[in-house]
Image: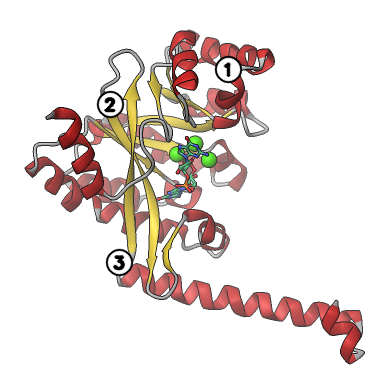
Amino acid sequence: LYHAKTNGKSRWSFFSEEMHAEATATKRMVSDLLLACEKREFVPHFQPIVDAVSGRMAGAEVLVRWAHPKMGLLPPEAFLDTAATMGILKRVDAVTFEALPEILGRLEAAGIELPRISINVSAGRLADPTLIHDIKKSGISPKRLAIEILESVYLDRIGDLVDWTLGELKELGATIALDDFGTGHASVQSLLKIKPAVLKIDRQFIQPIVEDETSRALVASMIGIGKSLGMSIIAEGVETEAHARHAAQMGCDYLQGYHFGRPMPAAELQDMLAKTNG
Ligand code: C2E
Ligand code: CA
Ligand code: CA
Ligand code: CA
């Protein structure tokens, strides 16, 4: 607006200039992202998922970071939306997954066996049959894999392909987890369609459970639905001892959040586990 006022240009030219700038930024990011896929600039980070009863690490969720050559380590929020709308998120997911066997191999050589590895898979990736191929050739046992999906995958009108992939994944013995449960508009429908084995309750419901009765009631009903369908429950966003205690008492099977560890590079996870085990 400042620009429009000072140089007397019309609002229309202002908006089109702004839109032009945005389109240029998007174009630049898309070409940077494509290059990043080629140069393998995506760095998987790992966040512990802890057994609520024993307190032991049950596995880890893989969360991607982009080691951008100029801007440093970028969180997913900096690039996932653009990647998704421009149709390259499935490549980012594929490149991130490709990095896992070597990293897990290094952890195993150091005596660290992650019982379960949870990966986030975009709608585009779920509609792409090469996901199954890539899992098979990775050497990672599908039984160790949990595939985290958002209920919004069904809003992308790719239902049949997604159903096929989900069927294959289940046949291979992989676990399907419904991510961010409770935040979408079709929570119950997606439960019926996806039939996940694991429900992840979003942190917006978990974090107020200590002081807010309504949140406690909501979480209790989500746990109730999940349990009655034979699912296991992960509480997300566990930041404090009190969050952990409440979530465990209410029946969550696994806990995840900053209280137990932030997403970290594999080497850091290795150090952390070396300390707790020795
Ligand atoms: P998500 O799958 O729900 O992952 C959990 C997010 O919450 C992560 O953010 C994590 O760092 C953050 N988090 C974990 N514990 C806590 C906590 O105690 N408190 C708070 N405030 N936050 C916590 P991150 O790593 O920035 O990832 C954001 C989202 O990006 C993820 O949400 C996931 O939907 C997506 N994402 C991340 N990696 C990938 C990937 O490789 N592929 C795809 N398709 N999506 C990914
Ligand atoms: Ca997730
Ligand atoms: Ca989540
Ligand atoms: Ca989320």
The residue carrying mark 3 is 40
Q: Secondary structure at mark 2?
A: strand
- Label 2 Cα crowd, 10 Å radius (few <14 / some 14-19 / many 20+): some
Quadrant in the rendering for residue 40? bottom left
Q: Earlier in the sequence, mark 2 or mark 3?
A: 3
Name the residue that disc number 1 marks: 210
Mark 1 or mark 3: name the one nearer the start of the chain.
3
Evaluate whether residue 142 shows in this view.
Answer: yes
Please state which amino acid type lies under the numbered disc 3.
Answer: Arg
The residue carrying pointer 1 sits among few (fewer than 14), some (14 to 19) or many (20 or more) residues within 10 Å by Cα, namely: some
> CA–CA distance between discs 1 and 2?
24 Å
Residue 58 numbered tag: 2
Local secondary structure at mark 1: helix
Residue 197 or 242: which is nearer the viewer? 242
Of badges 1 and 3, nearer the viewer stands 1
Compare residues 115 and 97 and report the one nearer the observer: 115
Tell me the distance, in whole angstroms, between the alpha carbons under discs 1 and 3: 42 Å
In this rendered view, identify the residue nearer to me: 183 or 163: 183
